[in-house]
Each structure stands twice: as structure tokens, then as C-alpha cells.
Amino acid sequence: MNVIWRTLLTIWRAKLQLRRNGTLEPTAIGRVRVRTLPTDIDLLGHMNNGRYGSLFDLGRFDLLIRTGIWDVFQKQGWYAVVANETITFRKSLELWQRFTVESRLLGHDDKSAYLMHRAVVDGEVYAEMIVRARFLRRSGGLVPHEELFQALHRPDNLPELAPWVTEWAAASALPSTRVPAPSVWM
């Protein structure tokens, strides 16, 4: 709930930019300016590690809206869910510090799309998150990529995934929801 006002402001700004400038290419890098607020800070005085994901969501909303994907999803009754994410921290963001959330679609495999988010200060990466997202129907089931690209009236021109992305996805995957996944510690 702490990020709701920033989310609504980001959605409003993205829709305004979409109307003014038209759609971005799916390979474009989206940028959202953010400032670290007191509600983002932990007891050590820097941005809480759990807050990065919420603020990177702002970049995802911006990118989905400005590429036109958001409107297609609303019309079709589709939505995206995060299946995996991994974040790497390099430097701390301090209270009141301005930074930019940079977001980019990396590509896709047969089930998922992959995005990269970065927290950037003066051109320097402070943190980076890779996200694997799946597209679902509100009525149930996956949205095949062919159907997605057809609905967007765009070809599949995203680049091939780097091998490390495919390896990361396989190494970090949990079992399907159709099979048991007992919590057994070794």
C-alpha cells in the first residue's frame, strides 16, 4: 500500500506519454525517475532490500503501458504474473536520493517473457533485477506468445535470450503447481 500513490502517478504519466509520443518499440528501455522516501528506508538508513521489487514494478507498469501491451491485456482479459526474480545489489540508495528505474524486455522462451530492471544513479548501476513473467487469461490458462504478438499487431522481434538467462530460469524454477512440492530441508 505504501507504493500505491507512486504506482497511480506512474500509470498516469505513462498513459500521458503514450498519448503524446505514441507506442515504444518492445525493445526500448523505459525510464522512471524515483526518489528514496522515508517509507523505503530500513534501520540501517538505506533503502530496504524488499522495496526494490515494488519500485521496479513502477518500471514494469511504465514499460507495459508505453509499449501498448497494457491496453491489449485489458481488452483481452490477460494479466502478467512474476514467476521468478533475482536481484543483485551493488551500492546502497540513501534517504532522499534520486535514481532512475530502467526497464527493458530481454526476450522470451516458449512460456515466459524476461525483463531486466536497474536502479541507476548518474549512469551507474546500483542494483539489477531479472524477472521472468508469464501471461495468463483471467478465464484461466496461459496466453501463447503467438497470440500475444498477433494481438499486439507486431512481429516477434525481441532478441534471442542470452544463454545465462535460460540457465538462470531452469536453475531457479520450482516444481509445477500440478505436482507436490513438500518443504523438506536437506
Image: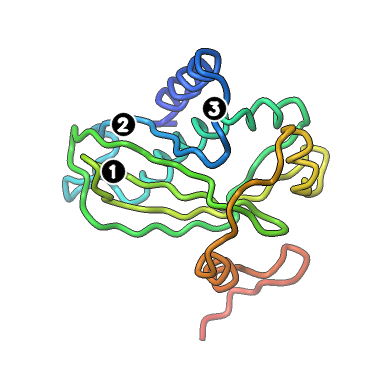
What residue type is disc 3 on?
Arg
Q: Marks 1/3: CA distance?
A: 20 Å
Q: Residue at x 54, y 27 (%)?
A: 66
Residue 76, above or below 57: above
Q: Secondary structure at mark 2?
A: strand
Left or right for 108, reference 55: right
- Percent coordinates x, y for residue 181 in the rendering: 66, 72
Taking the view exactly as shown, the residue that stands out farthest to the bottom is 186
Q: Which residue is mark 2?
A: 34
Tell me which numbered mark, 3 or 2, is placed earlier along the sequence.
2
Q: Which mark is residue 120?
A: 1
Q: Secondary structure at mark 3?
A: helix
- Percent coordinates x, y for residue 71 in the rendering: 67, 25
Q: Marks 3/2: CA distance?
A: 18 Å
Q: Residue at x 42, y 47 (%)?
A: 117
- Percent coordinates x, y for residue 129 in the rendering: 42, 53
Q: Which mark is residue 66?
A: 3
Q: Residues within 10 Å of mark 2 (few under 14, many from 20)?
A: some
What residue type is disc 2 on?
Val
Badge nearest the viewer, 3 or 2: 3
Q: Residues within 10 Å of mark 3 (few under 14, many from 20)?
A: many
In terms of depth relative to the viewer, which is nearer, 91 or 180? 91
Q: Secondary structure at mark 1?
A: strand
